[in-house]
Amino acid sequence: MGMNKNTVLAWATFIMILVGLILIGLGAFRYNEVAGWGFASVGIGFFAIAWVFNALKGRV
């Protein structure tokens, strides 16, 4: 099975969204103190990077 660059970017986008959801979930449900805000903000950062990966599909 050959993976071209668009397939790699699609998988990277999917993994980044999954990790972002997990980090936001950790920040919301596991850590109730200030660390939760850090986890949630990093999760939002993962969403931003996944958005960039999705925008790069077909252009690279």
Image (cartoon, rainbow, N blue to C red):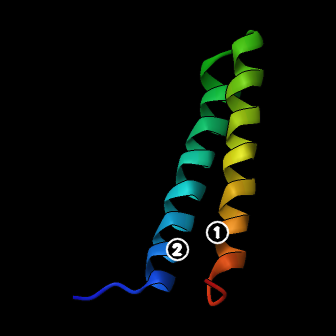
Residue closer to the observer: 56 or 20: 56
Pick out the residue farthest to the left. Answer: 1
Q: Position of residue 32 (x, y in %)?
A: 71, 14
| Image spot of residue 46 (x, y percent) | 66, 48
Q: From the viewer's perspective, is residue 18 above or below residue 39?
A: below
Task: Please report the residue visible at 73 percent of the width from the left and 33 percent of the height from the top.
Answer: 40
Identity, as a three-letter code, of the amino acid under mark 2: Leu
Residue at horizontal 67%, vertical 38%? Answer: 24
Horizontal and vertical percent position of residue 57: 62, 83
Q: Quadrant of the C terminus?
A: bottom right
Residue behind mark 1: 53
Farthest-out residue, front: 60
Q: Relative to 32, is 18 on the left or the right?
A: left
State the residue at coordinates (64%, 16%).
31
Query: Sequence-wise, which precedes: disc 2 or disc 1?
Result: 2
Q: Toward which corner of the image does residue 34 lie, by quadrant?
A: top right
Q: Residue at x 46, y 82 (%)?
A: 5
Q: Name the amino acid type tagged 1.
A: Phe
Q: How many marks?
A: 2
Q: Would you name the residue on which mark 2 appears?
A: 9
